[in-house]
Every structure is written in structure tokens, then in C-alpha cells.
Image (cartoon, grey):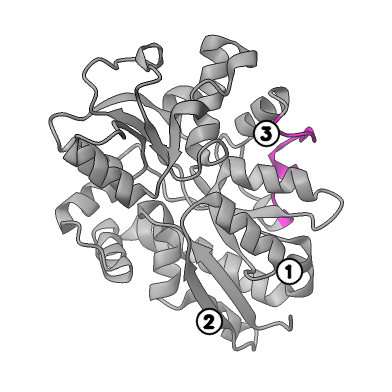
Amino acid sequence: QAEGKISIAQQFGIGYLILDVVRDQHLIEKYGKAQGLDIQVEWNSISGATAMNESLLAGALDVVSAGVPPMLTLWDRTKGKQNVKAIASLGSMPNYLLTNNPNVKTLNDFTEKDRIAVPAAGVGFQSRTLQIETAKQFGAANYKKFDDISISLAHPDATAALIAGGSEINSHFSSPPFQYQELLNPNVHKVLSSYDILGGQASFNVLYTTQKFHDENPKTYQAFYDALAEAEQIIKADKPAAAKTYIRVEESKLPLDLVEKIVQDPEIDFTIVPQRTYIYAEKLQELGVLKNKAASWKDYFFEEAHGGNGS
């Protein structure tokens, strides 16, 4: 892989707004040119962390994006081999566990009759977050208690099922913008937020790559990192414009006022600085999901990210 090429994959939802802005404004190309490099950027859309991780390890993609736990799983598995690490956060945003079952008010109320939709059952951001809370409430030995009633389903399909009602899927560990759409339905209510579990604002998804790509493409990597940093500033400077970018790039059918409301939600911070990621590293290692113990968040982020006030 010569310098000047980068293939990136993102998932669905407003959590990828930083990438939408990078793409819309051709920021990677801009920072490449500043270094005398014409960078070819290839964009891909993939649903679910499992497919992302497989594509990265197969060398089909240079950079992938998923929740913090799937990135940590790959960091753990490839330590001393491909050495996968995170590049940057894509922002902090809460994920809500929602249900249309009126009898479910807390985790205690779920029964084997309920079905919780998540993008990657057992291993994705939503499942791992739920496992951390389950271990706290029901004991570490039972951390997988809700895996049995979890079903892998892409967010758009889970959203449609929850709003329509009447299907076996009556719950969804959702993410923005889908959770906002679902909560517009009077039959849907929130059981808990990922922020409740993590103790405040926390990174939802991250970008990650292999040591090989990082080391062999220093100019391309730096251009990508600089592009992400500028995209953060662009969003923060004009949130209504960022909302329009999202709709344009994602060809979203969502009403503009809803997207603006999400982008301006004080719970959401489009920042490339990692927040509260170490809670996952610590808890998942305690549960035996991760073999390697990270001393700090800097162990699993490449050094370009170390300058920020991360956690």
C-alpha cells in the first residue's frame, strides 16, 4: 500500500457526522495536498462491528469505525501481531435502551419473551454496555444474561419494528438519530441510557486501523487525522449547517428540524477526543472479555490522539 490511498468504512446514523463532513468538504484531500500528496479516498458503508473487524483484518479496508468495545476486542486480539489501535473518537453521545413493552421499566422487568434488537448481538457497543450494567446489577457471573434475548438487526430495521409494534422485537438498544424517531411514538419509552451506565458523557464510536497502515502511510494518516480535527471545528461552528450536511451526504429522509435538534442536543459532543473509553477497557478485562489489561486509554490509541484531554 503506497502513500496516497485510504479506504474508510462507516456505519449508519448521526454518530458518523464527523465523517460526513470530512467527505462532504473533501478534507482528507485538502490536507493531503498541503503535504504535496494527492490522496484517493474510498468510502464504504457497513452495518455492524463484526463485519467491520473482519474487513480490517482481511486488509479489505484501511480504516473502520464502530463502538469502543469492538475496537478494544480487536486491540486485544491483535496485540503483538497487527496491533490494531484507535485513531480518534467520532463523538460522545448517549445510546438509549428503548421498549414498547409497557411492563418493562427497568432491566429487572425483561423476561425470556422479550427481544432486544442490537446491531451486533453479544459483541457490539450496545451489547457490551448492557453486559457491564448487567454485571453490576446481577453479578459478574451473569453478565451475558440478556445476550439470550438479543437479536442482531441494523438500526433502521430495528427502528421500523419498534415503531410499528406487533413483532417479536419489542425493544431496541438504539442510537441517534434512531432513538429520537422512536421516542416520537407514544408507545415507546426509555429504560436506560448508556450515560447512566458509564457515569456521564462517553465516546460512542471510534475509528481504528492497523499499526502497518499507521506506520507505512504517515502523510496519509496525518492528513486523515487533521481532516477529522477540522470537521469537529466545522460542526461546532455551525450546527444547523452540519445538520444539512448530514441529510445531504446520508441522503436521509429525516426532517431537518429533527436532525438540527439532535446535533444541538447538549448530551451530544462531536469531538475527536476520547471520553470515558477506559471504563470499557477496565470492566471488559475484569469480565474476562479482554485478556490484556490497558494501563490507560493511551495504550489503545495511536500517539496522534494523545495530545487531547482524553480518558
Q: Position of residue 256 (x, y in %)?
A: 17, 58
Q: Is residue 12 left or right of residue 289?
A: left
**Quick one: which residue is furthest to the right in this view?**
80
- The residue carrying pointer 1 sits among few (fewer than 14), some (14 to 19) or many (20 or more) residues within 10 Å by Cα, namely many
In the rendered structure, which amino acid carries the disc numbered 1? Phe
Of marks 2 and 1, the one in the foreground: 1
Disc number at residue 151?
Answer: none
Q: Is 266 contained in the magenta span? A: no
Name the amino acid, label 2.
Glu
Residue nearer the viewer, 183 or 16: 183
Q: Which residue is mark 1?
A: 213
Q: Quick check: 248 left or right of 50?
A: left
Q: Indicate which disc residue 281 carries.
A: 3
Q: What's drawn in magenta, residue-wise?
A: 289-303
> Is the residue under label 2 in contact with that under label 3 (CB below 8 Å)?
no
- Distance Cα–Cα, label 3 vs label 2: 34 Å
Q: Residue at x 87, y 51 (%)?
A: 80
Tag 2 secondary structure: helix
Answer with mark 2 or mark 1, whichever residue precedes in sequence. 2
State which tag comes first along the sequence, 3 or 2: 2
* First of labels 3, 1 by sequence position: 1
Q: Which residue is mark 2?
A: 29
Q: CA distance from mark 3 to mark 1?
A: 23 Å
Q: Nearer the viewer, residue 177 or 170?
A: 170
- Quadrant assignment, res 59: bottom right
Amino acid type for the residue under numbered disc 3: Ala
Is label 3 in a helix, a strand or a loop?
Answer: helix
Q: Is residue 240 above or below residue 92?
A: below
Residue for point 55% across, 50% down: 49
Of the pair 186 and 248, the residue shown nearer to us: 186
Is most of the magenta stretch helix, strand or loop? loop
